[in-house]
Amino acid sequence: MSELELLLPGEADVLVRGLRSFPLLETGSRGWNQQHENLEKLNMQAILDATASEGEPIQELLVTHGKIPTLVGELIAVEMWKQKVFPVLCRLEDFKPQNTFPLYMVIHHEASIINLLETVFFHKEVCESAEDTVLDLVDYCHRKLTLLVARSGHGGAPEEKESQYSSPMQELQKQAELMEFEIALKALSVLRYITDNVDSLSLSTLSRMLSTHNLPCLLVELLEHSPWHRWDGGKLQHFEGGRWQTVAPAEQQKLSKLDGQVWIALYNLLLSPEARARYCLTSFAKGQLLKLQAFLTDTLLDQLPNLADLKGFLAHLALAEPQPPKKDLVFEQIPEIWGRLERESKGKWLAIAKHQLLHVFSPSEQDLRLQAQRWAETYRLDVLEAVAPDRPRCAYCGAEAFKRCSRCQKEWYCCRECQVKHWKKHGKTCVLAAQGDRAK
């Protein structure tokens, strides 16, 4: 493992072995929370290992113990909870949370899993070990990217700034919206890694990607909208490392990581032999794909030389006749996880929400103190700073921060004024975190 270790090899093995699926009813429960903490530790250790380039034991353990399907199942389960249970929970008359941290942890769970999958899916054996759940993961990525395209057509990405006048639930909703945007960008990377293995994917998975979802055309729309870019005050900004960063004029022609992921995925889906043999180039597909020609500049080709092959493919496509839609009768496997979870909980969403309000999201002060202690043990400051993509940002205004809250050591600020303004929101959390540290 890396020089800075969060987990010893034996500890990581125990945590990976213990990963399991939870029913939707148990989302947020004590056992579920313990697994969330374990996943966070595995996630941070996997990032440390990948950064150190000294082997990736977390990825190897997940493959050895066959836990990639478990992670995919948990990813889709929390996605369903957010869509089906959370809105019902918020409408309950008795739902008046004094502390939103337990809710935040459930909402954050999806981000934790997709981040871990993004880190490990770079390796071909991880994609292979997903087995049939790669179908479910392709559907998941398609859902996220479709929402990303839809959002870019209605105002773009969410803002990071918060208001001192917002209620805890309003702040939670804002955080959830920004998190959803980041999750979609992670899903894009996971999808690109799946396309790296397009020649070894099952026919059902290929059909799902090329026919059912027509991913090449969706990726063209993503390039057109590029929701990870924006102009603010006449300055170009890229969304990287969890925040918007201004791009220097000299760097504006440089290909961003997310643009690169889209181009590589398109290259894989359009030029690999298996995909080319099965993708039907209809009039619609031809029209969409030919839009790519305007993006294939010399500057782009200098940065991704392999795209010269894609440019040649498009030149040939422009002269070719479109193909009629295929009407072959094909028996193929379909994703199962979403449908199974929906059948198991059909008509029970209100009952699940009421159960969780009573047993999960109404914690006592003592419960919150104990949970704060566990969070303090999980999120070690030295590890967080090692995996952080850049300098910390002010919790109030988002500027580069230089001072940390002296009590809890969790939040950063650029100045005393911002810390005072943020205290209304941060105060209770700060006290709980500090109590958790002292209890260790």
Image (tube, rainbow, N blue to C red):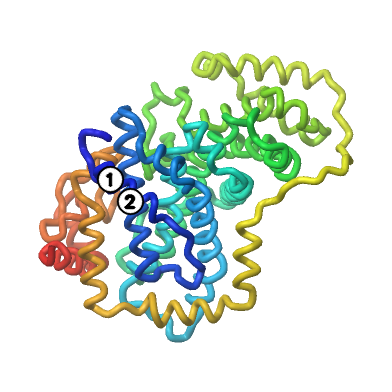
Crowd class of label 1 (few under 14; some 14 to 19; many from 20; radius 10 Å) = few
Residue 153 visible in the shown view: no
Q: Judging from the image, what secondary structure is the residue with disc 1 in? A: helix
| Residue indicated by mark 2 | 14
Q: Nearer the viewer, residue 56 or 98?
A: 56
Check residue 373 in the rendering and tell me which mark sits there, or answer none.
none
- From what the image shows, is residue 177 above or below residue 318? below
Name the element at disc 2.
helix
The answer to which quarter of the image holds residue 365 is bottom left
Q: Residues within 10 Å of mark 2 (few under 14, many from 20)?
A: few
Q: Are marks 2 and 1 in contact (CB under 8 Å)?
A: yes
Tell me where residue 371 sits by quadrant: bottom left
Q: Residue at the location (28% across, 38% down)?
A: 390
In this picture, residue 217 sits left or right of residue 227:
right
Can I make out residue 87 in this image?
yes
**Residue 17: image x %, image y %?**
39, 51
Question: Is the residue 78 above or below the residue 198 in the image?
Answer: below
Task: Residue 398 in the image: state x and y as whole percent.
Answer: 29, 49
Where is residue 350 shown, x and y percent of the image? 55, 80
User: Looking at the picture, which amino acid does disc 1 mark?
Assistant: Gly
Mark count: 2
Q: Amino acid at mark 2?
A: Val
Name the residue: 61% across, 20% down: 296
Give the residue furthest to the bottom: 93
Q: Nearer the viewer, residue 259 or 204?
A: 204
Residue at x-position 51% and y-position 28%: 260
Residue 55 position by quadrant: top left
Would residue 207 appear left or right of 226 to someone viewing this image? right
- What residue would you read off at disc 1? 10
